Image (cartoon, rainbow, N blue to C red):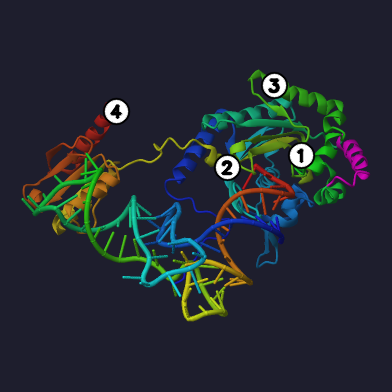
Amino acid sequence: METIASVRGFKDILPGEVEKWRYAEEKAREIFSSFGVREIQIPILEKTELFQRGIGENTDIVEKEMYTFTDRGNESLTLRPEATASVIRAYVQHSLHARDPVSKLFTIGPMFRRERPQKGRYRQFHQINVEFIGVGSPFMDAEIILLLMVLLGNLGIEGLQLELNSLGCPECRPAFRQAVTHFLKDRTEGLCEDCLRRRDTNPLRVFDCKVEGCRQVIAHAPQLLDFLCTDCKTHFENVQAYLKVFDLPFEIKPRMVRGLDYYTRTAFEVTASSLGAQSAVAGGGRYDRLIAELGGPDIPGIGFAIGMERLISLMPAANESFVQNPDIFIAALGDVPRLWAFALCNYLRMAGIRAEMGYDEKSLKSQMKRSDKLMCSFTLILGDRELQENKAELKDMKKGTQETIKLDNFDDIAEAIIRKVSGRNEEIV
RNA sequence: GUGGGUGUAGCUCAAGUGGUUAGAGUGUCGGGUUGUGGCCCCGAAGGUUGAGGGUUCGAGUCCCUUCACUCACCCCA
């Protein structure tokens, strides 16, 4: 038979690795709870139009990266390439603004983009998304960035860099855009092919081109920050001031332009050089026009996304304490003892004890080996010999000591084992 | 979509310029006295060398095609 492999860019997360993911998620939930961020779950599939309108028609994501198909009802649907549009859709659809003027929401789940896979980039990838909706105050910007940095710090991740920029607003951006267009107009030579194209479609994007020639050209280009209107300027200054309250180091990157159309004012990114070419662990920004753009009230919002795969790869590997080893392994010798083992093993599990057993007829030696491999604290040896006397041998795998216990009553055995296991834990502490 | 690199056992890797039966470590299973793990020793199973075609007396090795993986560009988490 031919085997079937997973789809390109879609990864399995195997036991052993899953624990790390769960740890990261649990930590995130803990911190969200402190910051008053509540979970929202949204569908993986949306009407294509949502992303076209939300993300922007002329973005790479919408132009060439979406998994879009027509369903049997002849409706164009798309596997979500990001979460913000969906969250806002849900927010508007259920009029959450009417319940509370400020909503802090998070959601965790898979996203889909049909790009060429490479290090830190997959076609199905996972994000932790946080959105603060309803308040335009720079306090919100500072708070959400602080939240992000606290979470990353709590996961033991080091060597991170926080980068900030302001993208202006519909008031001031057109002027800047015009200035850039004008600037680039007669600098055809020195620009790479991509940038020549960008010059017409999205001139701001020329700013984060990595080609040396373009960088030199851009070095003399007008600075976005010089064009900010008074409101945007004070907003940006305040965000920085509030971040300084927590001694959060950051760097202003005037060249940072985010790829999604909806961003306004504050844009930020957290990078780690060890990630390779895809160095961003998290990125986000303010989107004061998006909610109205999607038919909702004209209220502001700000959010970020953390790339789970990238996050996991940055987490220190040292802690293997994620896995819980069995408390006891029951080694049975013979058919009747095996039936007893089956009953006892499952009884112990129902009593909350992590128990495993040998299901096949195997030598005691091989069962002991398995117990050792599973790193069970104890092994219960149950053979015909013991059964005749209504007892079993309980071996402490670490000490190597062994004692006889009675089989009269499963409750007593469970209790004895619980005592032993907890007693051991105290010793370790 | 474009370019580079790599495909040999479950995993990590060997096999001078083409040459007999494709090896090792690790993992799996078994054994080293009757029913006792780790360390050590022995043994076994496990491969259509990614797939297809070509050159040759002979291909894991050379050529072509294709697929997969991987890194990078574009862009993004």
| Residue A341 visible in this rendered orientation of the protein | no
Marks 2 and 1 sit apart, C-alpha to C-alpha, by 21 Å
Residue at image point 26% right, 27% down: A427
Between discs 3 and 1, the one toward the N terminus? 3
Which label belongs to residue A242? 3
Question: At label 2, which amino acid type do we have?
Answer: Arg
Residue A146 magenta: no
User: Mark 2 falls within which chain?
Assistant: A
Q: Is residue A135 above or below residue A110?
A: above
Question: At label 4, which amino acid type do we have?
Answer: Ile
Which of the two residues, A39 or A1, is positioned nearer the viewer here? A1
Question: At label 3, which amino acid type do we have?
Answer: Tyr
User: Mark 1 falls within which chain?
Assistant: A
Residue that badge 1 annotates: A257
Between discs 2 and 1, the one toward the N terminus? 1
Which stretch did the figure color magenta? Answer: A172-191
User: Mark 3 falls within which chain?
Assistant: A
Residue that badge 4 annotates: A428
Marks 4 and 1 sit apart, C-alpha to C-alpha, by 52 Å
Residue that badge 2 annotates: A310
Relative to A384, A48 lies left or right:
right
Task: Determine the secondary structure under disc 3.
Answer: helix
Between discs 3 and 2, the one toward the N terminus? 3
Task: Determine the secondary structure under disc 4.
Answer: helix
Between discs 4 and 2, the one toward the N terminus? 2
